[in-house]
Every structure is written in C-alpha cells, then in structure tokens.
Amino acid sequence: MTIGKSRDRENAPSSAETSDEAVQAADTPSIGRVLSTARIEAGLTVDQVSTATRVRVPIVHAVEEDDFDRCGGDFYARGHIRAIARAVGVDGEALITRYDAAHGGSPASKRPTQLIDSGPIKVPGRGRPNWAAAMVAAIVAVVALIGFNLVSGKGDHTGTGSASAPLPSGSGTGSVAPAPSPAVQPPAPAPSAAAIAAVPADKVTVKLVAEGTSWVSAVDGGGKSLFQNNISGGQDQTFTDPKQIKLVIGNGGAVHAYVNGKDLGLLGKDGQVVHVTYTPGDPQAG
C-alpha cells in the first residue's frame, strides 16, 4: 500500500504545473480580442471591415466583444468569424476550432441528429379537394380544346380549297375539267309600280327610289312643301296630289322615278340638278 501511494504521487501533476496551465489559459486572448487587435494593427475601422465583409457594424462590434448571441446562431457566428478574420488577416479556421470547442462542437457532428429529428414532410391540404389545381386543369383543358378547334378548322379549310374538280366520266385526254364557275346572283328586281298604277287616274302619283344619295324637294299643287331631305341607299318617297307634284332633285343620276305607274328611269346624270313637274295623265316635264 505504501508503494502504490508513492507511485500515484509521482504520476499526479504538481500544484506548480496546474497553476502554470491556469495562468496560460487566462493569458490567452478571446476570439473577439484576437479579431479586434488584428483589426487595429491592420489600420482598419469597424466600418471598413463591415464594408469588406458585408457584416453589419453592430454585429462586428458584437463579435469583437465575444457576444455571439447577436449573430443569430452558431452557423452565422462561424460565418461572421471566418469573414472578419479574413478581412483583418487572421487564421479564421483556428478561431472556428476554438469557437466549436467552447460552444459544443462543430456543425458536422450535429447534422445527422437534425436530419433524424426532422419530422415527416407534410403535404398541405391532404384530404381536402384542391380547388386551385382543379381550376387550373380546367382552364388548360379549355385552352387546349380551343387551340385544337382552331387548328382543325384551318386544316379543313385548306383541304377543301385544294381539292380539284373530278374528271368527267369517259374522258381519255387526261385534261382536268374546269372548276365550276361561281353562281351569279340574279339582279335585284326593280321596284314594283303596281301600287302606283292602281291609284286613281284623276291624281298625279310620283314615287322616287334612291340608287345613290341625293337631296329631294317636293311641293304639291297648292304650294305646300311635302318633303325636303336627303334620300339614299334604296330609300323611297311617294307623293300624291290632285293637281301637280313639283320636284327639285339635287343629283338626277341617283334618283329613279315612277310617275302615274310608268317607269321613267333616272331623272338625270350624276351631279345634275333637275327641276320637274308632273300632273295627272301622261308624265310630262314642266
């Protein structure tokens, strides 16, 4: 027992050695003190370091004061230490090693735990109908259908226009039969004068039909104005009086006249001003 105790005393560190290690640890400057001293020796201000590292001025002050809580977490603290150390010319990795030793190890040792602790991925809205997705799908379907119809319509039109007329039966010459000419629309029938012809013979009846645009003035046998206005585009006016109808036509080439049931045709040439008077019986110009 005496021999064992003597060996333990030989292996145990002396009180002098323990005190030397404590003094050495106390003399070692902190991370913030190292960065602050290096910045001052490099002749840089806090603002210049902030500009070079893009670390805000309050954070630079906090790191130099070893207040790493203001960095927002270990990840950001390591990044700020590394960036500031690079700017002031200090070995940043050595300072990171000291920071990890004082704050619970490097982030690599924590990464697997974080992955294991992360909960399962949650799908929002599971079990509920996704109306937004359904609406988008419906809109896409409608747009696709419209595009398909447009493309199909163009294809049908092209195919119809490119089809050639069939060859006549029994033709051995090989010539292509001419395409049928488009149907010619029959001319519009002239206005019927049956209603005019049926008027009493003791009155004068004048019907004017516009084939263009013209100003028309009509006065009856008593000097009363019956009409003063423009007529155009197939418009018509009918005037009846026991004595006479006096007309002034601003554009004779644009007015077709029917007098007492007879077709007199156009009353003049284009742009010609026509003055005419009609009475019962045969048409006659005044």
Image (tube, rainbow, N blue to C red):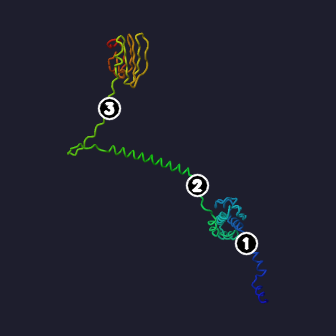
Could you tell me the amino acid type at mark 2?
Answer: Gly
Residue 184 percent across, percent down from the top left? 31, 33
Q: Quadrant of the C terminus?
A: top left
CB under 8 Å between discs 3 and 1 = no
Label 3 or label 2, whichever comes before in sequence order: 2
According to the picture, the residue beneath numbered tag 1 turns out to be 28
Indicate the quadrant where residue 170 lies. top left
Label 1 or label 2, whichever comes before in sequence order: 1
Q: Is residue 229 above or below residue 127?
A: above
Nearest to the eye among marks 3 and 2: give it: 2
Q: Residues within 10 Å of mark 1 (few under 14, many from 20)?
A: few
Tell me, for residue 185, which label it has, or none: 3
Indicate the quadrant where residue 154 lies. top left
Any part of residue 210 in sight: yes
Could you tell me the amino acid type at mark 3?
Answer: Gln
- Residue drawn at x 36%, y 23% as measured from the top left: 254
Residue 128 percent across, percent down from the top left? 58, 53
Q: Quadrant of the N terminus?
A: bottom right
Q: Is residue 57 above or below residue 257?
A: below
The secondary element bearing badge 2 is classed as loop
According to the picture, the residue beneath numbered tag 2 turns out to be 127
Q: Is residue 7 left or right of residue 179?
A: right
